[in-house]
Amino acid sequence: MKKFSLLLAVAVLSMSLASCGGDEGTTTDTSAATGDTTAAEEVTTAAPETTEEVTTAEPEPEYEEVFTPSYIDNFDDPDNTNWKANAQMTDFAVADGYLTTTSTGGDPSIANKNDFDLNCDEIDVIVVKFLNGTPSDATQIFFTTDTTTGFCEEASYKDVLWNTDIDCSDPAAAAEDDWDTMYYYVGDNDLWTGTLKDVRIDLSNGEGQFVVDYIAFGTVEMVEVTAE
């Protein structure tokens, strides 16, 4: 009986070992297959070619300032000029298309003989082209209207000249760079309204000669430059 029990135990143990060994023998390694499947599924799709639309930006328009005079004195007619020496000026003359004069002090000026009686709304700028034979680079222009009487700082415009100590003896031979063309923009002054009466021009604040080529009043307009 004991022998049979022992044999039965050995048999059961053998069956258990065989069962374990069988599981090991039939185990399938699927890692490689899984890896292969992943590699197969991992498909790289190239991006489709795209054609970018190249747009050329339109060039920015260019503008230039166009001056249209409503009044101009080129000093071609000495008898019809409306300008005179106002203060600290001598040798005042109009001839050969120029106004010439000499400053004798630190506050020289020229002014109009008769009222202009021009509409301030129709004047944007006063333009003066001249040679400055003095050492001063300061310039100022004053005005009066039917509502603002008497020259004063409030009714004036100041600017700085490019050139000083220019030889004024022969204006016809002066280089273009020797001339100062001053633009006194008048529209930003609240007193510039109504009817323009008088204008006083301090060409500089020094002693020496001046030659004026022209004095003009007028409007300015920004006009687009057209391609040629």
Image (spheres, rainbow, N blue to C red):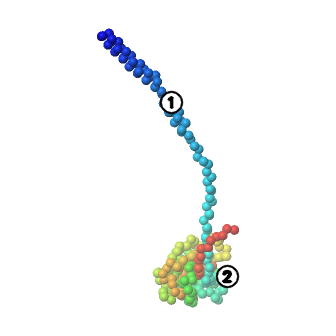
Q: In which quadrant of the rendered image does the C terminus lie?
A: bottom right
Question: In this image, 36 relative to 14: left or right?
Answer: right
Callout 2: SS:
loop
At a point 59% along the width and 86% down the height, the residue shown is 83
Q: Earlier in the sequence, mark 1 or mark 2?
A: 1
Query: In the image, residue 201 lies at what x, y percent?
Result: 54, 81
Name the mark nearer the viewer: 1 or 2: 1
Residue 184 lies, in percent from the top left, at 55, 77
Q: Is there CB contact under 8 Å for labels 1 and 2? A: no
The alpha-carbon separation of the residues under discs 1 and 2 comes to 108 Å
Between residues 220 and 98, which one lies in front from this camera angle? Answer: 220
The circle on residue 32 is 1
Callout 1 secondary element: helix
* Amino acid type shown at disc 2: Asp
- Given residues 29 and 204, the one toward you in this image is 29
Q: Amino acid at mark 1?
A: Ala
Residue wearing tag 2: 96
Mark 1: few/some/many CA within 10 Å (<14, 14-19, 20+): few
Residue at 52% over, 35% down: 37
Q: Residues within 10 Å of mark 2 (few under 14, many from 20)?
A: some
Does residue 119 appear in this view? yes
Q: Which residue does the image show at 56% across and 71% down from the upper left?
A: 162
